[in-house]
């Protein structure tokens, strides 16, 4: 019998109760001025979620280019600066540009051997990526479907994945500890790199900079709405299998309380001010598609419902309820072809 990882000793009920009483000091209030609340929240998010790193011009190196259905996939590397060099895949349609584009943000899944390959077809056979696509995407990586529809698609290995893989699941705690001791965090590096990737995508000559979306599944869904809140380049967002109110996730055995993977979604001190749906709502009134399956065991129903209520209130306050699509399909933690079709039909309408 497996011993529980989370007990009252490390959940610390008294401190959880303190956080419940405090609430979120800059969270959405129904009587708030929407634009004023959004701008104040964005400043808090930038101050507490982004690292103090220099931002030199991003450089690119191209290694290979492989024809695929609908276009080509380039294997590239992006140098973000500060020694952060990230392997990436860039898919370009075979039609005339400039093209609408998607920043495809890969998931966690405790699988570190692949990152970008979770979103786009590989430039060489990769059994791990093929198994991943079969498990979560019905054998159809969602980046391939976006390319077929005429989108340019960029997917970048986050720190710790794919070409930047570290030492596996348990090493995440050591990485977090070392980054926090120099005033950084895994979550801050990930948020910064995602914004830098959006910056670079907006400069690509084949991309229409006014029609860039962020799309992600699981941790990638979290990254998608976080990037939309931080980056002016994201015109619409599709987030799959990641939306909930934080207090509803602070339960035994939830990923948010087990450590390790939670480090990528935890900005120290930010939870004093903003709940998770508050962060997502900082992109309002730009279009947002959020989807969490009814059978997704990672997200308790009350936590999802609370978050969806918050999102609805904010988009309504902006007079933009028609730009918010909240879905609870009868599925688990997945992004299968039928749901890809529904989400991307909607996305195409938003970016016309």
Image: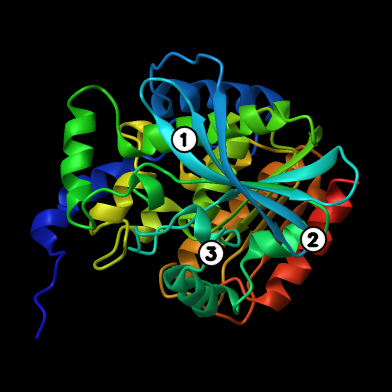
The mark total stands at: 3
- Seen from the viewer's position, the closer of residues 154 and 170 is 154
The residue identified by callout 3 is 241
Using the image, tell me which numbered label, if any, was put on residue 191. Answer: 1
Comparing labels 2 and 3, the label whose residue is closer to the camera: 2
Dot 3 or dot 1: first in sequence order is 1
- Seen from the viewer's position, the closer of residues 285 and 259 is 259
Dot 1 or dot 2: first in sequence order is 2
Marks 3 and 1, Cα distance to the nearest angstrom? 18 Å
Marks 1 and 2, Cα distance to the nearest angstrom? 30 Å
Q: In this picture, is 218 found above or below 222?
A: below
Q: Is residue 156 left or right of residue 171?
A: right
- Seen from the viewer's position, the closer of residues 63 and 251 is 63
Q: Secondary structure at mark 2?
A: loop
Q: From this viewpoint, is residue 269 visible?
A: yes
The residue identified by callout 2 is 70
Q: Tell me if mark 1 has few (under 14), some (14-19) or many (20+) residues whose alpha carbon lies within 10 angstroms of its own.
A: many
Q: Which image quadrant for residue 41?
A: top right
Looking at the rendered image, the quarter that the N terminus falls into is bottom left
Q: Is residue 265 left or right of residue 171?
A: right
Residue 51 x, y percent position in the rendering: 38, 23
Q: Which image quadrant for residue 148?
A: bottom right
Residue located 63% across and 76% down the image: 336
Marks 2 and 3, Cα distance to the nearest angstrom? 27 Å
Q: Secondary structure at mark 1?
A: helix
Residue 241 x, y percent position in the rendering: 53, 64
Comparing labels 3 and 1, the label whose residue is closer to the camera: 1
Comparing labels 1 and 2, the label whose residue is closer to the camera: 2
Dot 2 or dot 3: first in sequence order is 2
């Amino acid at each position: 019998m497996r011993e529980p990882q989370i007990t009252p000793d490390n959940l610390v009920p008294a401190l959880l109760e303190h956080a419940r009483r405090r609430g979120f000091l800059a969270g959405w209030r129904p009587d708030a001025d929407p634009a004023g609340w959004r701008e104040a929240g964005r400043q808090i998010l930038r101050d507490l979620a982004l690292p103090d790193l220099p931002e030199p011009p991003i450089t690119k190196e191209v290694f290979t280019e492989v024809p695929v259905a609908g276009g080509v996939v380039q294997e590239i590397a992006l140098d973000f600066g500060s020694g952060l060099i990230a392997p990436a895949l860039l898919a370009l349609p075979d039609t005339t540009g400039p093209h609408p584009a998607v920043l495809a943000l890969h998931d966690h899944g405790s699988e570190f051997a692949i990152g970008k390959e979770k979103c786009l077809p590989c430039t060489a056979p990769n059994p791990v990526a093929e198994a991943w696509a079969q498990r979560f995407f019905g054998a159809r990586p969602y980046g391939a479907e976006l390319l077929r529809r005429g989108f340019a698609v960029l997917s970048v290995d986050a720190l710790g994945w794919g070409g930047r893989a570290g030492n596996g699941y348990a090493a995440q705690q050591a990485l977090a500890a070392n980054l926090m001791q120099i005033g950084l965090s895994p979550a801050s590096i990930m948020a910064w790199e995602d914004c830098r990737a959006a910056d670079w995508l907006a400069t690509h000559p084949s991309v229409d900079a006014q029609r860039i979306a962020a799309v992600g599944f699981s941790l990638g869904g979290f990254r998608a709405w976080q990037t939309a809140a931080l980056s002016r380049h994201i015109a619409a967002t599709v987030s799959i299998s990641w939306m909930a109110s934080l207090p509803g996730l602070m339960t035994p055995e939830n990923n948010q309380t087990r450590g390790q993977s939670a480090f990528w979604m935890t900005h120290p001190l930010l939870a004093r001010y903003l709940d998770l749906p508050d962060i997502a709502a900082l992109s309002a009134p730009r279009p947002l598609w959020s989807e969490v399956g009814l059978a997704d065991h990672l997200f308790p129903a009350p936590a999802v419902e609370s978050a969806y209520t918050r999102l609805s209130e904010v988009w309504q306050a902006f007079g933009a309820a028609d730009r918010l699509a909240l879905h609870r399909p009868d599925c688990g933690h997945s992004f299968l072809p039928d749901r890809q079709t529904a989400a991307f039909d909607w996305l195409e309408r938003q970016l016309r």
